[in-house]
Image (cartoon, rainbow, N blue to C red):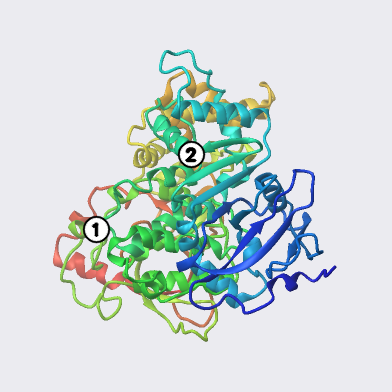
Amino acid sequence: MESEAHAIYRGRPLDLDDSFRLLQLLPGHLDEPVRIRLFSAQLSAAPSYEALSYTWGDPTLTSVIEALSDKGEDEHKPGVEFRSTANCHAALKRLRKPDANRVLWVDSVCINQSHIPERNHQVNLMADIYRAASRVVVYLGESDENSVAVLSWIRELDQPSDFGNGSGALPPSKEAVEGFFRRPWFHRIWVIQEISLAQKAVVVCGKDEVDWGSFTVLYQHNENATRAARLELPYPVTFASRYNKPYRDGAMTYARRLVRMLGRSRHCEATDPRDKLYAIIPLVNIRDGSRTEESWGEVLGISVDYSLSVDRVFTDMAVALLNQQVPLDDVLRHHVPGHEARGLSSWVPDWRIQRENGWRHAKYERIFKGFPGFRGHPVELMFDGVPGIILDKNGTRPAVVGYTDSSTDRCPIRVHAINVGNIIKTGPVCSVADDFFPVSNWKELVEEARRQGSVVPKLERLMEIMIALKLGYPNSVPRGVGLIERYNEQMEKGTCPRKPLRQVIGETASRSGARARHEMDAILSVCDGKRLAITDSGSVVVVPGNAEVDDAVWVLDRVRMPFVCRRTGSGEANGVRLIGTSFFFGIMELEAMKEHVSDVRAKAEVMRRVEELVVE
């Protein structure tokens, strides 16, 4: 019996037209070896087939599958042995019929993953492959007591067995449902495309099968639930359930909607980080009616290419977004501080990082006032017609510096900016995971700034401002700050049982109602990973935890939040790397910058402060 895995892909690679492979799953019982036959087809004239949606799982855990020749030889003749992931093997065993063949498309088997040109070609076809399938079969894994109860309940929501008289099965606990949705399939990047494009879909978990339409009913049921009862459904479920509904971002350009969806899906898992982009790009393109006749590669000027490094793919995407007139602010909202990648320019989003920038969940954009001298957003708070401040020939985007197809993965950009302060002192970093919220130290820094003549309110008021921007009703902030202080004192003295800070905050706030609990959560999420700093002008700034003394705070043209930047010493006179967004008290409120520069002399003074930075 042949044992070389490449033998199953004999013949011409799949790198032209709409050719692809299908898998004929031969009949057998659950305990028998898995046997398949691969054959080539064209998407435009393919036989009826089902597409499998599953998770690859641990690549080091493998099982043997036997592949027979596609020449129609005797099924009892030995074939080629090759190893698939254990998850793929389990899915094929579960889906195999006892007495008939079943035709499937399975990405890890039907694509020669080691042949880069074929892999590139087939990934470009994947959206069409899933759309053309007669049905998409979702394999979640084998069942357990929890999954049986949850799937029964989901089916009951869609097809009540009691005909509406209230005698149907009781719903499982919220914890059981959320535990079910922690299965890996619900957090994989490719499944967003696979389930959204399906003509029909069925979910298989062990012996249980539930139509995907029942999950859409669950989504609608959840949307109508009270805040306390509402579930945290995985993004693939929420996106697919809304997929064919009117798109509220429809007025946005294709590229702006793309970067928004990349942010919303960044927490999803991918075996290959490049798939964080490749899995989403064509899906967004399909939503764009104006682009139905163009491939997304033509729109963006990029294509699937697994021969490129991860850093190069991320940089190509960032440059393409700027070239498609996506505002720099839209790109920088996905910058996450404290995770600098050596091969990436600091302004390029690193999609390997699964968490979002906590600041960007807040609605600072509503009230962050503009700076005179900049031509751009927000227009109503800026002076128009000021000559000389132009980013490039059309004044709409940053200038990309020396980035070509043969250059390195790094890509500097030139932007105009105003320095609003240099950091001269920092406090300790708030770490919710370590139950450390240095309220007392932060208060001391604020009082120090006030003693130096800085016009800044007390810490409680500063935090109210931050939380108001996130939630709009900061009534519980002073009480929350006091609660954190008492927690710190009791933990220091050892006078209370050891409990996580988040748990104590949640228990106490819950007694005051849902609104107070959300405010407390907002305090923790906004401050986690941040530290307080004082600038040379005496201003108070909340900065990323990796900010240091001598870093500077800059307002970048058409970027809505100030950025902490660090000089690079690379030879560029104004070369900097972005450290992260900040909250700079005194320029984040709607008070008055416009009035402060109402005369020509003041306007000219601000103009002299505008510098050109090279963001590396």
| Crowding near the residue tagged with mark 2, few <14, some 14–19, many ≥20 C-alpha atoms within 10 Å | some
Q: Nearer the viewer, residue 491 or 536?
A: 491
Q: Of helix, strand and loop, which one carries label 1?
A: loop
Amino acid type indicated by mark 2? Lys
User: Quadrant where the N terminus lies?
Assistant: bottom right
Look at 18% across and 57% down and name the residue there.
Answer: 380
Q: Tell me how far mark 1 sits from mark 2, CA to CA.
A: 32 Å
Look at 70% across and 59% down and name the residue there.
Answer: 36
The correct choice, above or below, for 205 with respect to 33 in the image is: above
Query: Any mark on residue 310, and which?
Result: none
The correct choice, above or below, for 167 with respect to 299 in the image is: above
Where in the figure is residue 407, as x and y percent of width and height? 52, 84
The correct choice, above or below, for 88 with respect to 460 in the image is: below
Amino acid type indicated by mark 1? Pro
Q: Of helix, strand and loop, which one carries label 2?
A: helix
Look at 68% across and 50% down and name the residue there.
Answer: 92
Query: Any mark on residue 443, and which?
Result: 2
**What residue does disc 1 label?**
378
User: Is residue 427 at least partly visible in the picture?
Assistant: no
Q: Residue 59 sits in which quadrant? A: bottom right
Q: On the rendered structure, is 497 left or right of 320? A: right
Where in the figure is residue 192, as x and y percent of width and height? 49, 52
Q: Nearer the viewer, mark 1 or mark 2?
A: 1
Q: Residue furthest right?
A: 1
User: Is residue 483 at least partly visible in the picture?
Assistant: yes
Where in the figure is residue 187, as x and y percent of width and height? 56, 47
Whichever of callouts 1 and 2 sits on the residue coming sooner in the sequence is 1
